[in-house]
Image (cartoon, coloured by chain):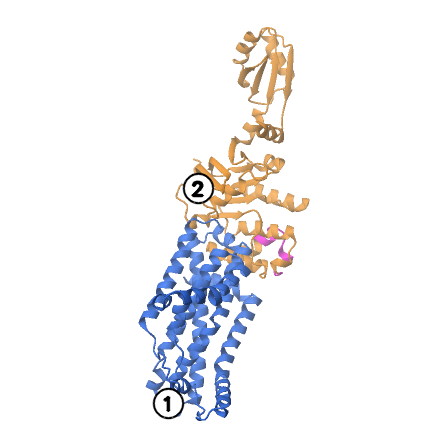
Amino acid sequence: MLKLLKIDIRKYLYSKVFWVMLAVYFALLVLFFFGVEKFVNEALKNANDSSPVSMPAFSIYAFPYVWHNLAFLGGFLKIFLALIILYFITSEFTNNTIRQNIMNGMSRNSFILSKLLFVMVLSVFSALVLLFSGFVLGMLHTEEITWTLMMQKSGFIAAYFLEVFTFGVMAMLLGFLIRKPTLSIGALAVYYYIAEPIISAILPEQVAQYLPVEAMGNLIDIPNTALMKMFGVNFRDYVSLQDGITCVVYSIVFIMLIFLIYRRKDL
Amino acid sequence: MDHLVLEIHHMSKSYGHIRALNDFSLEVHKGDVVGILGPNGSGKTTILGILLDILKPDAGEYLWFGKEPVSSSRKKIGALLEQPLFYPYLSAVKNLKIVADIKGVSHESIDKVLETVGLTDRKNSKYKTYSLGMKQRLAVAATLIGNPEVLILDEPTNGLDPKSIALIRNLIADVARKGVTVLLASHLLDEVQKICSHVAILDKGVSLHAGRVEEVLNSALRVEIKAEDMEGLYKEASEMAFISECRLEEDVLVLMLKEDVEPAEINKSFASRGIYLSYLSAGKRSLESYFLDLLKE
């Protein structure tokens, strides 16, 4: 395991593309996390001007709500992480370096495992950015900080990790199937933005909630804000076990599919 | 005791409806230098790809070192398949470190193998800045990492200048002397004739001939003779020590010689037995003419 990770790190450590993509992703996440309150409050102020009911400016960064709010936001950027995953998995095929790896004595399963580790490491990185951002923002915006208050709802960090990881594994499957960078990125985008929303609209709700992207999105529901509550909408402010299980099952199925396909496939 | 390094049994492989390999079998002993000869598209790379787990055969099996192939058996094999395959944004040294890590050997030999192929000056340049010949030489260097027991080289002199070709050939001869088993796929016949001890000839995925290079060349020592008394001629010829095989073909007797015997010697041998040849045609053929004949059949 460690050996595989070491070999994979050698592949990325000196890749400019890797560091640039990772830096952009990091910057986007931080920008999203730290900029959203200003954006929301600005929007509310405008709404206030045209509304008879006054809405107070509020902080979405206070413990413990910060975890839920940031996790929900970060979820929108998972497509960018999938881009990094697809780029580097398909480049092993376009450069034919997967052949070189296998020829030199890496087993096919180890190769797949090394890419799974890659997805895992990137997902952990993303979750860590969430953890640190949430911690800093929470510290700055909470009046009375207690340990319990801070830890409350921190389960959203785990849910966020699962969401990003499951999506990363789905991208990995596409990368291994399609093997070409632009085509696989296109396929993922089409499925994510077009195909699944359409399928989901056609299927009844009880079935549609089990579609992969839908299930990943359901993990972290839209956070309740004063605004939502005012309109009488109440979203789920906890992570449901059922959505968690659906995501785990998808991850396992996607991974098993890659292993199975590559038992017989030519490289 | 020479033991089997590689056994291939009845291997077949198709790409769609194209049959790339058909019931191919081969045995390779330790220390053999086997040339796999064949025109473009004859299945050479397919065989090597299967042996390296890059391709999966439709039928048949192969054993490395007498065992079912596993990934660790490939760690004892240095291989170059078709074209060099490296990370374009990494230097030669960094690429070879990945190779060494996969093989589970130290990085110590990297400088040495780069020197062997004459890439020391450029060892820290990115792979994508290399010329075709340099890429090919780096690929050869990669095969030498970790002192492999077997070398698999698919057209190793492709795209190289004459100096580099000589370098690669000397290198193969060198490792072969050290007892390393070599599988060399090539369509360059004189290359195989120069360095190989054994040869397997392929066409359209079918093995046409496999054996020692001398056998192939000697079987090319083919002499046609005629005399008035063809039956007597046949009887005498079948008793001669330097003739491995004789058969009547239409109105001539075809002799296969075990060794290189001058036509005058052959004539003399028959004369001493009271038979005077009315016709004698001898030709020592190169591997090339033998190969072309085989393909015609």
B260 above or below A75? Answer: above
Q: Which of A265 and B69 is in front in this view?
A: A265
Label 1, secondary structure: give it: loop
Name the spot of residue B84 as percent of width and height, x first: 57, 51
Name the spot of residue B190 as percent of width and height, x first: 63, 35
Q: Residue at x 37, y 72 (%)?
A: A219
Q: Mark 1 lies on which chain?
A: A
Q: Which quarter shows the N terminus of chain A? A: bottom left
B204 above or below A206? Answer: above
Q: According to the rendering, which colour does chain A have?
A: blue
Name the amino acid type tagged 1: Ile
A102 above or below A185? Answer: above
Q: Is residue A219 left or right of residue B266?
A: left
Reply yes or no: does residue A66 show up in magenta.
Answer: no
Question: Label 2 to label 1, Cα distance in Å?
Answer: 66 Å
User: What stretch of residues is rendered in magenta?
Assistant: B113-125
* Label ID, residue B58: 2
Q: Which chain carries label 2?
A: B
- Label 1 belongs to which residue? A145
Q: Is residue A179 left or right of residue B283?
A: left
Name the spot of residue B159 as percent of width and height, x first: 65, 47
The orange-coloured chain is labelled B
